[in-house]
């Protein structure tokens, strides 16, 4: 705590004394992070290096310019008896301070270009991962492996709204992190499903916008296993601050074991689609899915937010024929915030949540929606 | 003189008619200034809500949905309601006085361009009370968040933007027409005060880019209501197109905001240095160069959007170039002070703070231009800190300096110097406590427009919020100072309020009579 207070005090001091110098010097020493992370990839290192070059160039120029300015403010005050001279141009210095900065910029353009080339060096990856931004979660698909899952915030609403103490990893924890192996070049293909998001992992130096209808590519290769946390950095609606990125980098053997396990899960899951589920099973499962995926807009009590998100409680869709209800979840509602959940939720989860919506909060339809009904609808399209 | 302006003594009917139907550039300037100040307080109130919510991690006061409305409205109101009208107000008041013209060239249009503004902002602000809430998609309103996923009030937002655009275009045409046609004999272009020059160039920028903004919002309107797909990928459109169109407006827009601020500072620094502006003609050329460059750098706001590398490199190089003319200006200001006879009255304090803090914002701007590093900075609090250093310490500080500088000319009363200086220091310290830590937050990884954040960002957010409250308080002090000056200020009738002031505006009595330069002044 003392160390933290000390860091705070020192940094406050840096506000008063001129700033970037103190800031960057403190960054090396203090506990609370003030500077850009060096990260664990070539790209993040390149960004850090050019960042530090720029800081030092600006610091040197700043000391010169402000130093001269403060000297003038001290030496040429009227109160010290300064009498104004009348000169108002000088071709020589004016040319000088046009040409010298231009030369400095040209010199800086070289490392800046090299660094950017590194960012764009996305060729020949060992692994390709498709990343899709949804309101408000990420989907990771390991291309060619048949593994695909959603990664959502795990921090509870109670923590956010102060009804429970905030955990150590507040807003930095997800249901299922992206898992990568060390030493492999991974290419990220980033896209968006609804609005624009942006996938950022500072320690990788990768920030790519997730634009609907467009793929943007980034890459990472690291030798350091660990957990790396990032954020969504493009305003994407009310859940913008609540869709962190968590990446776990594992040793190759661990990664392979993890991947094999995920593939097995996918196979096992396929066998449950055909199973006949009981109403109770669906109700329990559906409530969990609803709170995770629907309550953000339609609210936990199914009442929605008037004028923004329609209520499900008593809605004609929830009380109408089952097929219409399935259609809304699979196809979404074009032109509205209601997106298609066909790729986001499994057939089992869709069936469960439909069953829940049709039988909760006084919606008393009484029918049972089975995963196979959802699958049939999907296949009929 | 034909007649004087109606005062309250003539009855409230006459008094209101005077302000509603006025075609007098001074009256309209006054209206603009008061309107922009009230918008400044409104936008500031939104900022206070934002900073109060961010005081601690977790959602305490408002919901994320409303938080997004606050960030959006804060940006829109500050840019379009506070800063732009403030400088139009200064232009209305000062340009005719500076070039020796009796009034603006198009006085009725002048009236219209002001009076549609309050309606635009009434419409915009009313969206907050509509079902579904106001605009919540950021002041940059990227599609499709602002189209398919927008609240229904977005149509009112679009209408309001159209009105603001019309107002700006009319104001700009008026300024261009005035400067081109109504200069006093002998007032050649290269003799005009720099404030006039920066405004002419700004006016051309406005005429060029406001229609682009109008185009962007019209395409949004079509996408939302008439089934087109300009920005909808599912219909063959492209969300990135929106960003190109928006920033083709948006980048010149930031220079529209800062160039008149340059002009103000270029008037004030020579006055309190008692020495002519150094490098007048290079200042003019630098302003024109900045204006030109502003049209060809827009996509540096979009480095992470997935442009081809050739595009990234081009926009990076072009952006870096802006540092050259901007540097020229800073060097000129400092050299103006060099071997002058300096005093530090409130307008000078704000101007010096402007030079220091704006240059600091320029440094971070240069860092942001480096595309590889921008991959880390983009859309974080580093960017927020950067543009508040250039917008607030730039435009707002210079606007404040202008108020203290010309207030004696406007109302014939002198402000209280001690109060002015106290307000300066509170503003200066509050500003830096508010925005300096945001650099650290951004570098450490906090994205902008976040309603809530992880615990590692808690310390600096608290510091920043405290600074923001102090800075907010400084604005109430400014309001107090202005009102006290108007009511109880020491009368000053001398034409030249400041010892070192030069220019035609200092040859008319204080307060400036309702009509000035009915016959053109003689220029020496």
Image: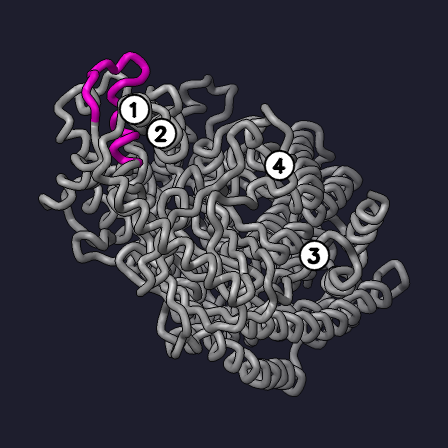
Whether B142 is drawn above or below B187: the answer is above
Q: Are discs 1 and 2 both within one chain?
A: yes
Of marks 3 and 1, which one's residue comes earlier in the chain?
3
Which residue is found at the position 31% from the left and 28% from the top? A309
Which residue is found at the position 33% from the left and 38% from the top? B157
Q: CA distance from mark 1 to mark 4?
A: 33 Å
Q: Are marks 1 and 2 in contact (CB under 8 Å)?
A: yes
Total numbered labels placed on residues in the image:
4
Give whichever of B29, A307 is nearer the camera: A307
Which numbered tag is attached to residue A285?
Answer: 2
Chain under disc 4? B
Location of residue A340 in the rendering, given as x and y in whole percent from the top left corner: 24, 42
Give whichever of A5, A14 is nearer the camera: A5
Whether A206 is drawn above or below A279: the answer is below
Q: Which residue is mark 1?
A: A356
Camera-side mark, 1 or 2: 2
Q: Is residue A190 left or right of residue A107?
A: left
Quarter of the image for residue A126 reads bottom left
Location of residue A312 in the rendering, given as x and y in whole percent from the top left corner: 27, 22
Q: Are marks 2 and 3 in contact (CB under 8 Å)?
A: no
Q: Are marks 4 and 3 in contact (CB under 8 Å)?
A: no
Task: Assign a secondary structure to mark 2.
Answer: helix
Which numbered tag is attached to residue A34?
Answer: 3
Callout 1: few (<14), some (14-19), or many (20+) C-alpha neighbours within 10 Å? Answer: many
Q: Which residue is mark 4?
A: B57
């Amino acid at each position: 705590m003392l160390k933290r207070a000390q860091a705070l005090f020192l940094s406050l001091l840096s506000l008063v004394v001129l700033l970037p110098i103190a800031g960057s010097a403190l960054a090396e020493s203090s506990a609370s992070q003030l500077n850009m992370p060096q990260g664990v990839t070539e790209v993040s290192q390149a960004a850090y290096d050019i960042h530090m070059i720029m800081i030092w160039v600006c610091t040197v120029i700043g000391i010169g310019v402000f130093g001269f300015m403060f000297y003038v403010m001290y030496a040429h005050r009227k109160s010290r008896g300064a009498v104004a001279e009348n000169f108002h141009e000088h071709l020589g210095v004016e040319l000088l301070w046009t040409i010298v900065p231009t030369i400095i910029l040209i010199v800086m353009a070289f490392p800046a270009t090299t660094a950017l080339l590194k960012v764009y060096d996305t060729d020949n990856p060992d692994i390709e991962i498709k990343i899709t931004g949804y309101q408000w979660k990420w989907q990771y698909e390991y291309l060619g492996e048949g593994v695909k899952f959603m990664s959502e915030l795990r921090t509870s609403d109670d923590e956010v709204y102060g009804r429970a103490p905030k955990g150590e990893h507040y807003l930095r924890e997800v249901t299922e992190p992206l898992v990568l192996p060390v030493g492999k070049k991974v290419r990220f293909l980033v896209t968006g499903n609804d609005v624009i998001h942006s996938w950022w992992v500072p320690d990788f130096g990768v920030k790519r916008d997730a634009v609907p209808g467009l793929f943007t590519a980034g890459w990472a290769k690291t030798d350091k296993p660990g957990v790396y946390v990032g954020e969504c950095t493009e305003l994407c609606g009310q859940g913008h601050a609540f869709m962190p990125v968590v990446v776990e980098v594992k040793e190759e053997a661990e990664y392979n074991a993890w991947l094999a396990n995920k593939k097995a899960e996918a196979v096992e899951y396929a066998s449950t689609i055909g199973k006949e589920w009981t109403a109770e099973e669906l109700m329990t499962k559906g409530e969990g899915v609803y709170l995770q995926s629907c309550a953000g807009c339609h609210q936990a009590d199914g009442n929605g937010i008037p004028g923004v998100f329609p209520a499900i409680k008593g809605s004609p869709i929830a009380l109408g024929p089952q097929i219409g209800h399935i259609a809304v979840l699979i196809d979404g509602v074009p032109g509205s915030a209601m997106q298609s959940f066909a790729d986001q939720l499994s057939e089992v989860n869709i069936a469960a949540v439909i069953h829940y919506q049709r039988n909760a909060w006084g919606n008393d339809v009484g029918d049972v929606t089975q995963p196979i009904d959802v699958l049939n609808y999907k296949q009929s399209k | 003189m034909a007649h004087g302006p109606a005062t309250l003594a003539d009855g409230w009917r006459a008094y209101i008619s005077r302000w509603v139907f006025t075609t007098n550039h001074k009256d309209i300037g006054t209206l603009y200034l008061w309107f922009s100040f009230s918008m400044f307080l409104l936008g500031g109130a939104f900022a206070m809500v934002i900073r109060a919510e961010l005081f601690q991690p977790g959602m305490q006061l408002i919901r994320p949905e409303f938080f997004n409305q606050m960030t959006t409205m804060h940006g829109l109101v500050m840019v379009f309601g506070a800063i732009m009208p403030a400088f139009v107000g200064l232009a209305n008041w000062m340009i005719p006085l500076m070039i020796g013209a009796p009034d603006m060239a198009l006085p009725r249009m002048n009236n219209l361009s002001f009076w549609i503004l309050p309606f635009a902002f009434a419409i915009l602000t009313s969206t907050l009370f509509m079902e579904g809430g106001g605009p919540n998609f950021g002041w940059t309103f990227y599609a499709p968040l602002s189209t398919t996923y927008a609240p229904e009030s977005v149509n009112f937002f679009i209408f309001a933007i159209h009105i603001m655009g019309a107002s700006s275009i009319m104001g700009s045409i008026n300024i261009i027409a005035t400067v081109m046609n109504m200069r006093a004999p002998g007032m050649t272009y290269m003799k005009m005060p720099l404030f006039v020059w920066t405004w002419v160039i700004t006016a051309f920028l406005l005429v060029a880019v406001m229609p682009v903004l109008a185009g962007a919002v019209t395409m949004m309107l079509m996408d939302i209501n008439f089934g087109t797909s300009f920005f909808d990928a599912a219909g063959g459109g492209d969300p990135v197109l929106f960003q190109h169109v928006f920033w083709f407006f948006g980048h010149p827009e930031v220079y529209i905001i800062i160039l008149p601020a340059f002009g103000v500072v270029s008037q004030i620094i020579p006055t309190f240095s008692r020495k002519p502006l150094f490098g007048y003609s290079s200042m003019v050329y630098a302003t024109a160069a900045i204006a030109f460059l502003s049209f060809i750098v827009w996509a540096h706001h979009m480095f992470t959007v997935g442009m081809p590398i050739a595009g990234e490199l081009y926009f990076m190089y072009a952006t870096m170039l802006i540092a050259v003319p901007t540097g020229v200006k800073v060097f000129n200001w400092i050299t103006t002070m060099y071997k002058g006879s300096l005093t530090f009255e409130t307008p000078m304090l704000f101007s010096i703070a402007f030079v220091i803090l704006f240059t600091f914002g320029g440094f971070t701007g240069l860092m942001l231009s480096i595309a590889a590093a921008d991959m880390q900075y983009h859309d974080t609090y580093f960017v927020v800190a950067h543009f508040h250093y250039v917008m607030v310490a730039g435009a707002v500080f210079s606007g404040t300096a202008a108020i203290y500088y010309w207030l004696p000319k406007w109302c014939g009363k002198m402000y209280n110097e001690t109060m002015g200086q106290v307000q300066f220091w509170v503003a200066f310290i509050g500003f830096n406590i508010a925005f300096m830590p945001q650099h650290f937050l951004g570098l450490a990884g906090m994205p902008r427009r976040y309603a809530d954040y992880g615990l590692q960002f808690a310390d600096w957010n608290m510091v920043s919020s405290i600074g923001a409250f102090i800075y907010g308080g400084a604005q109430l002090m400014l309001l107090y100072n202005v009102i006290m000056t108007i009511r109880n200020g020491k009368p000053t009738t001398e034409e030249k309020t400041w010892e070192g002031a030069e220019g035609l505006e200092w040859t008319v009595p204080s307060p400036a009579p309702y009509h000035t330069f009915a016959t053109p002044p003689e220029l020496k």
